[in-house]
Image: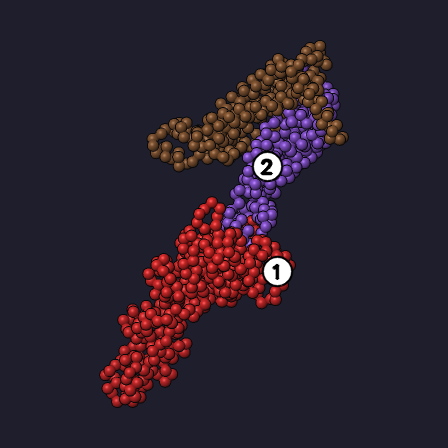
Amino acid sequence: MSLALVSLGFLDAFTGAIDFIFNQRESTVAGDEVGGLAQIGDLTVDHLEVSAIALAGSLIVAMPIGVWLGHHGRGELLAVAIGNAGRAVPELALIAFMVAFVGVGLVNVSIALLILGIPPILTNSFVAIRQVDRDAVEAARGMGMSEPEIVARVELPLAVPTLMSGVRTAAIAIVATATIAPLAGVVTLGDLIINRNVYGDDGVLAGGILVAVLALAIELTLAGIQRLLTPRGLRLERAPARA
Amino acid sequence: MDAPAAKGDVGEALSVEFRSATKRYPGSTQPAIDELSVDVPAGEICVFVGPSGSGKTTAMRMVNRMVEITGGDILVGERSVRDRGPAELRRETGYVIQQIGLFPHRTIADNIAIVPKLLGWERERIDARVAELLRVIGLDEEIARRFPAQLSGGQQQRAGVARALAANPGVMLMDEPFGAVDPINRERLQNEFLRLQAELRKTILFVTHDIDEAIKMGDRIAILREGGRLAQYASPAELLMAPADGFVEDFVGADRALKRLSLMRVADISLWEAPLAFAGQATAEVRAKLDGAEVPHALLVDGERRPLGWLSEGDLEQPTVPQRPHTSPDPVLELDDVMRDALSDLLQAETRYAPVVDARRTIAGVLSVEIISEFLTSDEALVEEHPAAERPLAETEEAG
Amino acid sequence: MSAPLASLLPLAQGDDFIQERTGTGCVQENGFFCAEWAFDNFDRYVTPLVEHLVLVSASVVAGLAIALGLAVMSHRRRWLVPPLTGLTGVLYTIPSLAFFIVLLPITGFGRTTAIIALTAYTLQIIYRNIVAGLDNVPAASKDAGRGMGMTDRQLLWRVELPLALPEIIAGLRIATVSTVAIATLAVFAGAGGLGDPLYADLTFRTNVLLAGGLAILMAIAFDALLVVAGRVASPWRKVRPV
């Protein structure tokens, strides 16, 4: 296949996908209309909704534990092991597990995504707090700060870069997995990909493009939030560790 | 080491000449090295010494082009260092740095073998060379298979030197090579190195901030002042006896006369003749000898001319020389003694004169504090008679 | 529950599984894990397993090669590091499924598409780790190496990279484990792998456990393998000062 033909084919498909995003057309299956900004918008909102719920949940569950463990210097093996284990879980298997063993629906999917988000947040919270300068903590303790105050005023601000990078990793994983949520009955942007019969080839490509763009947008947004939250004295050049 | 120059074997020691060598870094007004001209004959140790900021390390690194000169030239064995590519030049130059820089991921044997491998020696030749070097440098054979992390600091230092010697380079560059080691081991390493140099006779450029080390190790010393300018380039003797200016004088230290003495042996000085007396000899003869002698006391010796002690005036009023001396001969010094130690013995014993004996313990002459101080002010003191490799070595506490 | 099933993309073995479900007791009731069925039908998982292995191996090897090339390039030209980190970061951020889909019009269904996307995903972590590993090489070793007459290239391959190996292995471990997990989605690119049987019947519990379990086991096995390889390749790490 010559390069020219390939690129032509791609351009053709690409324009088809763009068209799908903006204009409604008739579905090949049911007589319904598919495509168009309105539907895209709905799907995107649904996608973000389930992702947000899951991310919030995993933050609430994992961050306090990670921070606590890191502050007290305990459970390093556990934190790292969970991080490694989380990486090994295939998204599809997780969703499949939900479908086969637990059930479908928004609640179950949110739980699955939440589980996916816990390892990076837990591990990164732990590492982030651990690597805060011990001397600064000692000094704070010596000044009479209570433990919670130390965590809030000294450790957390200094831990922001690594913490946030864990949040970013979790967010991306969650958004990515939300793409296959339709398999478990929760309709998201991934529906465009999974239900090809309904949306057609243009729809599938549009779905891929949209998910990619969404993920990048979220990553940029979180990066911006990270920069805002990072104390000025800490704006370091080096990339924070993604555990 | 005596093998004929095979492929990649450098062999003979080369001379090093700095000709108005200058190093100017872009953006700074002062040069780091300013028109340095130093001529190091082949087979000698030249020490670059100076305060921090004097550019001594920079000067050394210009020889193997780790720092490129911006003006002037440097010749190694009559060839400009710019004649060949830097990598090629460096393979013929031994390089030892303070932090040693052994490769942690290779065994000691592999570390030592690096330059020979780069030069393409055959496997057997490399193995033989490694074994030889380990022996010469004083490391156990089994250390060859260990990794640097398993060696002590002193062992690592030696391995670093062995590595630099591996391809038999004509010039060795050493940057504070013994700096990272504790003082006792440092002295040991220095002594061993000097013994090694006596055997190998390499041309060595040695950088240190320690003037005592410079005096001990150097055949010639180049003192650099801030801004990389040469303050004085001379033998240790000359440096100590005739410092060029106030800076050098300060740098060398107020005890430079004593430093000089620790570089000499008793044998290096002209001793006074001892008026000898044998038991049973007519005292008239002895008194005749004493007339106009430099040493106003007679020394009783045995048949082998070994000193037994000093005779008093009372002894000499007898018709013949008594069997026993009046006072003990101590301290009895040896020709091989380090001059500084000899002076110390003299002062401690509170005598003015001490007999000096040779290896068979026969009398060779008499030493006094006067002789020493006269020597120090004479022109003779400017002449360096011992190359560094043969300098008297201070006694260390451990044997051998 | 039937809605998602009804509109499944037609893929390799899907139909067989569903037919089997009308069979024996355990399977019919969808018990937790039907050992007998698993035993009898294990050969169905072999091809996907092998496909999965191939996908992961090819992607990680390609990722290593590319990341190594990028790292060598940016080793002497430090200004390249931020843009390359950013570029590999973008590739990492794009969800793999989306990447597969977007590649389909260009490279079509099949292994190539999957490998391209999987490789792209590994680049960031491997590249970052190689760069970090190279940065951590002791300066004294580099100075000594250069002073002995090693060219830059010799220094890189004989000293710097070997010393950076532990960190590179760490990056490879993370990349490999992640790739094993993500390769289950390769079924959407038409490349098979363990996602194939998984996707064919998401409701069949035994199937889910088998396919998912095999994937997780593979990840563990690769991780252990890399740990051992790392130890073998860097014997100097184990030694304690004598």
The image position of residue B288, as x and y in percent, is 29, 87
Chain C shade: purple
Residue drawn 26% across the image and 85% down it: B316
Residue B331 in sight in this render: no
Q: Quadrant of residue A188?
A: top right
In which quadrant of the rendered image does the N terminus of chain A lie? top right
| Front position in the image: B79 or A65 | B79
Chain A shade: brown
SS type, badge 1: loop
Tell me the amino acid under the disc marked 1: Gly
Q: Quadrant of residue A171?
A: top right
Estimate how packed mark 2 is, as few (under 14), some (14 to 19) or many (20 or more) residues with alpha carbons within 10 Å: many
Residue drawn 73% across the image and 19% down it: C22
Residue drawn 39% across the image and 66% down it: B238
| Front position in the image: B347 or C213 | B347
Instruction: Give left or right: position of B237 versus B68.
Output: left
The image position of residue C145, as x and y in percent, is 55, 51
Chain bearing tag 1 is: B
The image position of residue B347, as x and y in percent, is 29, 69
From the image, tell me which residue sits under label 2: C126
From the image, tell me which residue sits under label 1: B8
Instruction: Give left or right: position of C171 versus B253.
Output: right
